[in-house]
Image (cartoon, rainbow, N blue to C red):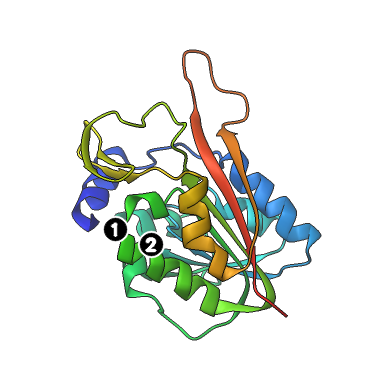
């Protein structure tokens, strides 16, 4: 997967533009209301979502598999924003405790053992009372069953990307052991652009026990 994303960022640079996702704005608002001040973002990309947290005076540390994406991010972030280069499958990269984790549209790209590792390590990074906010693609998304089936709820897209689509059972199976407090389906963006269906995600919130 490393080469896939590196090639995409080299060719397309800021693939998704500069604007943050609506789900990232929702997470940043929630984290601000909760008084969080230091968070980890696995799957940092070039930082379009991270800016929403920084605007709210929340310190951000990232993990990103693409060196090109990191270079793009460094054009917009100060040296105070640390970005670890590597896969989330290699976590942990440090022993820092964070009071929040935000991970958007990453887990469903991973193998089952990698998903479990990312969730587990994110939880281990949390301070007591800290929040994890994951977004994962839903089995109600229009891309479900579009492509070659390679496993339960798992398909290879026409572009060659392996996707695991989450339903309620998968959410419970992967997150209940990590303080699951909320799971709801969301449209991204909230108001799709003309000619676009947008995507269906699960918003998954977990809180580490006090």
Which quarter of the image is occupied by the N terminus?
Answer: bottom left
Q: Tag 2's secondary structure?
A: helix
Label 1 neighbour load within 10 Å: few <14, some 14-19, many 20+: some
Image location (x, y in percent) of residue 48:
51, 48
Which quarter of the image is occupied by the C terminus?
Answer: bottom right
**Marking on residue 60:** none
Say which residue appears at 68% left-offset and 64% top-offset: 58
**34, above or below 157, in the image:** below
Q: Nearer the viewer, residue 54 or 130?
A: 130
Question: Do the residues under discs 1 and 2 have CB atoms within 8 angstroms?
Answer: yes
- Left or right of 208 in this view: 113: left
**58, above or below 160, in the image:** below
Residue at which label 2 appears? 115
Say which residue appears at 30% left-offset and 46% top-offset: 152
**189, above or below 75, in the image:** above
Q: Nearer the viewer, residue 129 or 21?
A: 129
- Left or right of 26 in this view: 51: left
Residue 65 seen from this side: no
Residue extending farthest top: 195
Image location (x, y in percent) of residue 95:
49, 86
Residue at which label 1 appears? 111
CA distance separating discs 1 and 2: 6 Å
Say which residue appears at 32% left-offset and 69% top-offset: 89
Image location (x, y in percent) of residue 181:
67, 59
Image location (x, y in percent) of residue 114:
33, 65
Residue 62 seen from this side: yes
Task: Residue 8: name its quadrant.
Answer: top left
Q: Nearer the viewer, residue 73 or 58?
A: 58
């Amino acid at each position: 997967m490393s080469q896939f994303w590196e090639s995409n960022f080299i060719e397309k640079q800021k693939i998704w533009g500069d604007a943050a996702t609506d789900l990232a704005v929702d997470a940043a608002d929630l984290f601000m209301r909760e008084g969080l001040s230091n968070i980890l973002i696995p799957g940092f990309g070039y930082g379009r979502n991270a800016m929403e947290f920084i605007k709210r005076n929340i310190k951000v540390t990232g993990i990103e598999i693409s060196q090109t994406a990191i270079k793009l991010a460094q054009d917009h972030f100060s040296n105070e924003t640390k970005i670890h280069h590597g896969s989330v499958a290699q976590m942990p990269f440090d022993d820092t405790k964070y009071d929040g984790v935000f991970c958007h549209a990453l887990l469903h790209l991973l193998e089952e053992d990698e998903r479990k590792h990312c969730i587990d390590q994110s939880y281990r990074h949390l301070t007591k009372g800290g929040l994890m906010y994951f977004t994962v693609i839903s089995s109600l998304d229009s891309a479900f069953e579009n492509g070659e089936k390679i496993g339960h709820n798992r398909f290879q897209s026409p572009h060659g990307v392996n996707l695991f689509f989450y339903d309620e059972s998968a959410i419970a199976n992967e997150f209940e052991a990590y303080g699951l407090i909320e799971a709801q389906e969301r449209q991204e963006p909230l108001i799709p652009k003309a000619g676009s269906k947008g995507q269906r995600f699960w918003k998954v919130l977990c809180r580490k026990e006090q």
